[in-house]
Image (tube, helix red, strand yellow):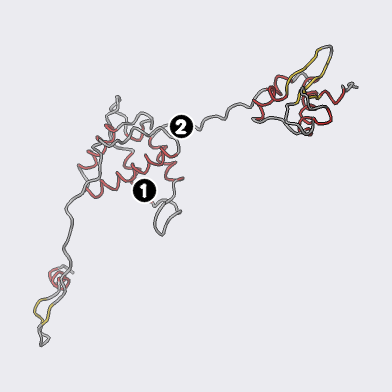
Amino acid sequence: MVARQANDGLRKICKCGRRNWAKCSDGWHFNFTWQGTVYRFSLDKALTPKLGRLIRFKHDAETIAGELRDAIMGNRLAEYLAPPAPPKPAAIIATFAEYGTTWFTAATLKRGKNKGKPRPANDRHLLNTLITLPTTHVNPALTLGQLPIDVIVEADLEVAFRKLAESRTWNTVNNYLQVVQNLWRWGRKHGLPTAQWFSPESDVKRTVGNQRHVRLVPEARDAQGHLVRASEEDRLLAVAPA
């Protein structure tokens, strides 16, 4: 049976008096002897790295003192006093392709009537094309999808979008660019290393093409109701094959 010391080995080194220890704001000190070894230290100094706080309430100090005695007798004092291991950093998404898959799954729509809903299948289609595009990485054999996201630079995206523009309209290329910009912004918000993808001086920008202003012309009739001009729809249907 372990012989308990006065006040269970808890005390304060202050001028408040023992009767006021439970009320004063001074720190608690621990004192315990086990197998001829004296263990004496401030609970605040010993436990703050582990708990992240000071120990002020008597019942809290008594609970910790009991745990300390058990740890000492079990030869586990160093383990008990050790601060918790820092949390492991989130795994860095290795490639653009993997990052795109995470974004497609986690980043729901932000605007309009579909706000909060999953991204449309078209975004998945755009990603599938983007990951096959060439880049200017030191290894020309690598596609954009194979590049780690922390090594992608604007020059890589410039080459990729020049390749897109060879076979697609400016409006379609803008759709691809919108997806990459969304990826970039989402990554920055979540602490992923995508900060170097775009800059104010970037040549990867949305293209504004010729705007269409033609509208279908309706039919026209005179005051007597005679047809003066057939509607554009009728004229198109008249020459269209069956």
**Residue occupying the point 44% across, 34% down:** 93
Q: CA distance from mark 1 to mark 2?
A: 22 Å
Q: Quick check: 203 left or right of 23?
A: left
Q: Residue furthest bottom?
A: 224
Foreground pick, 31 / 111: 31
Residue type at the position of mark 1: Asp
Foreground pick, 27 / 109: 27
Q: Are marks 1 and 2 in contact (CB under 8 Å)?
A: no
**Residue occupying the point 14% across, 76% down:** 219
Could you say where residue 161 lies in the image, as x and y percent from the top left?
25, 39
Foreground pick, 144 / 103: 103
Residue under label 1: 123
Mark number, residue 106: none
Secondary structure under the numbered disc 2 in the rendered image? loop
Could you tell me which quadrant the N terminus lies in?
top right
Q: Quadrant of residue 62?
A: top right
Secondary structure under the numbered disc 1 in the rendered image? helix
Could you say where residue 196 lies in the image, as x and y percent from the top left?
34, 32
Q: Quadrant of residue 192?
A: top left
**Residue occupying the point 67% across, 30% down:** 51
Q: Quick check: 38 left or right of 100?
A: right
Q: Nearer the viewer, mark 1 or mark 2?
A: 2
Could you say where residue 98 lies in the image, as x and y percent from the top left?
42, 37
Mark number, residue 92: 2
